[in-house]
Image (cartoon, grey):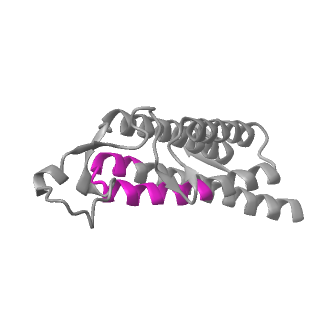
Amino acid sequence: MSVATGRQVLSLPLIVALLLAVSAGLFAAGVAVEHASATPYAAAGSGTHAESGEEGGESGEQKERATPVAGAASGTSGERVWGIAVESLVTVTVAVVVSLLLAAAVWRRPRRPVLAVAAVFAIGATVFDIAEVSHQVHEERVGIAALAVLVALLHLAAAVAAGVLLRTGSRTASA
């Protein structure tokens, strides 16, 4: 299946590959921006450090003093989704490398197993992206939330396009 764009024709496998590659780059950029904008200190009342139930005469001002966020000094993030440290360097690297490898595989060899793996990966990434959107909205980081929405839409588009390829490929193989 091809899409005409002026004089050139883009094939659907190339579109899936581009969607996976661009989403990988934007995902990495979003994590980098989030890490760069993260402050190593947060107010104790922000939910990062519970002090409820403490007694001893501390004033409200003393309770709201800045306290270090876990992982800030080491450059790692404590954010976990379903037990996965989604913003650790290892997780981000693996996600980007897998996405780029799948992009190359879909582009060069758009076979059913490759397309199925790409679709499943893109659907899984979309789920994590939506969780990230929710997290960023909760943290009131509108710009990063908007970027996460874009990445989620790119992953969703890649999953749909891979699904279309799977469906049309099965028709042509059975005909």
Residue positioned 58% across, 38% down in the render = 21
- Given residues 172 and 7, the one toward you in this image is 172
Q: Position of residue 98 (x, y in %)?
A: 67, 40
Q: Position of residue 66 (x, y in %)?
A: 22, 43
Give the extent of the magenta segment: 123-147
- Given residues 18 and 125, the one toward you in this image is 125
Q: Position of residue 127 (x, y in %)?
A: 54, 60
Residue positioned 46% across, 59% down in the render = 130
Residue 175 visible somewhere in the drawing: no
Query: Up-down: is 157 above or below 75?
Result: below
Q: Judge left or right: residue 108 versus residue 97.
A: right
Query: Up-down: is 80 above or below 106?
Result: below
Q: Judge left or right: residue 113 versus residue 43.
A: right
Residue 105 visible somewhere in the drawing: yes
Q: Judge left or right: residue 126 versus residue 63.
A: right
Query: Up-down: is 65 above or below 25?
Result: below
Q: Is residue 138 on the magenta stretch?
A: yes
Q: Position of residue 175 (x, y in %)?
A: 87, 65
Magenta segment's dominant SS is helix
Residue positioned 53% across, 48% down in the render = 86
Q: Is residue 18 on the magenta stretch?
A: no
Residue positioned 40% across, 32% down in the render = 73
Q: Residue furthest right?
A: 174
Q: Residue furthest bottom?
A: 53
Q: Quadrant of residue 52?
A: bottom left
Q: Quadrant of residue 106?
A: top right
